[in-house]
């Protein structure tokens, strides 16, 4: 579906924020751990609305470049973000990666990360997860904001796994999928169901139920895969064939 002029305008303003922050980091104006300027001042310097600025900052937070501390402010993430390396999405464009393949990788990775988080997660991780679940329920009517808290929830689970290598791989995969999700989330109709699933995953991790956390995460991601229409082609075909078979059987016999 072609993007509307409004979509293109919003995307342009988002990238305006991203590129401006990138330039501030590259020239040393912003360092890891620095707090960004107040929202009103920052928006005025970019000549954009505060709403557009929040969307851009949310994008950077989902990418791991910014950290939003509620009631405190927004900070550059510790450790310099590397804007120079080719992302997985660029590699996918070059080598023909499919979205269903990205989801498959995500399901395998994140279900295992949830199991590890149930074993190794600390109280701080549990608190952070609970906060993101609460924010998801608070933003059910704001899909773009909801998506940011969704991404942050999954990132906390990866951190709670205690395996930075797996967490980094997961981050690469989910970051490369973020743009597509950001463009489709406005049409989502199942955000409450999604929030409930996240709450169940959080409770299983907090209760140290490794197997339950793994099963719930896999279930959640498979439902998300179906909702976003990125199932494996053979799976879609099998479902279509089954549906056609049911339709054929339901027709009255005119012989």
Image (tube, rainbow, N blue to C red):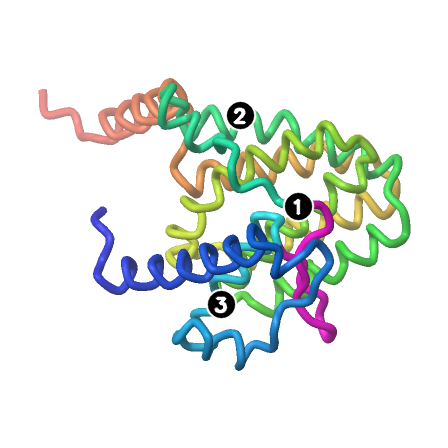
Expressed as whole percent of the image width and height from the top left, the position of residue 158 reads 73, 39
| Residue matched to label 3 | 142
Please tell me how crowded label 2 is: few (under 14), some (14-19), or many (20+) other residues with Cα within 10 Å: some
Q: Residue drawn at (80%, 36%), measured in percent from left and top? A: 161
| Pointer 2 with pointer 3, Cβ within 8 A | no
Indicate the position of residue 250 as horizontal and vertical percent values: 25, 31
The answer to the question of whether label 1 and label 2 lie on touching residues, with beta carbons closer than 8 A, is: no
Mark 3 or mark 1, which is nearer the start of the sequence? 1
Q: Which residue is mark 2?
A: 104
Residue 188 colored in magenta in the image: no
Label 3 crowding class (10 Å Cα cut-off): few <14, some 14-19, many 20+? few
Question: Nearest the camera: 182 or 172?
Answer: 172
Quarter holding the C terminus is: top left
Say which of marks 1 and 2 sits in front. Answer: 1
Q: Residues within 10 Å of mark 1 (few under 14, many from 20)?
A: few
Residue 128 picture quarter = bottom right
Q: CA distance from mark 2 to mark 3?
A: 28 Å
Mark earlier in primary sequence (2, 3): 2
Magenta region, residue range: 66-80
On the rendered structure, is 2 left or right of 234?
left
For residue 141, say whether it is visible: no
Q: Residue at x 34, y 63 (%)?
A: 10
Left/right of residue 218 with respect to residue 47 in the rendered view? right
> Nearest the camera: 67 or 7?
67
Tag 2, which secondary structure? helix
């Amino acid at each position: 579906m072609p993007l509307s002029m409004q979509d293109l305008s919003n995307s342009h303003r988002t990238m305006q924020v991203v590129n401006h922050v990138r330039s501030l980091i590259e020239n040393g104006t912003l360092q890891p751990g620095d707090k960004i300027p107040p929202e009103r001042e920052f928006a005025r310097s970019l000549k954009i609305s505060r709403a557009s600025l929040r969307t851009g900052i949310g994008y950077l937070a989902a990418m791991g470049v910014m950290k939003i501390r509620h009631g405190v402010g927004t900070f550059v993430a510790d450790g310099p973000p590397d804007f120079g390396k080719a992302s997985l999405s660029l590699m996918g464009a070059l080598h023909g990666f499919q979205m269903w393949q990205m989801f498959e990788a995500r399901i395998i990775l994140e279900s295992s990360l949830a199991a590890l988080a149930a074993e190794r997660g600390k109280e701080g991780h549990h608190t952070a997860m609970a906060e993101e679940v609460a924010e998801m329920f608070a933003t059910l009517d704001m899909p773009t904001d909801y998506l940011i808290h969704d991404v942050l929830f999954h990132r906390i689970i990866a951190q709670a796994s205690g395996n930075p290598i797996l967490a980094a791989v997961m981050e690469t995969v989910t970051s490369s999928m973020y743009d597509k999700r950001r463009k489709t989330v406005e049409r989502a109709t199942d955000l409450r169901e999604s929030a409930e699933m996240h709450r169940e995953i959080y409770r299983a991790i907090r209760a140290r139920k490794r197997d339950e956390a793994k099963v719930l995460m896999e279930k959640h991601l498979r439902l998300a895969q179906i909702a976003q229409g990125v199932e494996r082609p053979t799976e879609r075909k099998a479902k279509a064939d089954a549906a056609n078979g049911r339709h054929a059987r339901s027709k009255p016999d005119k012989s």
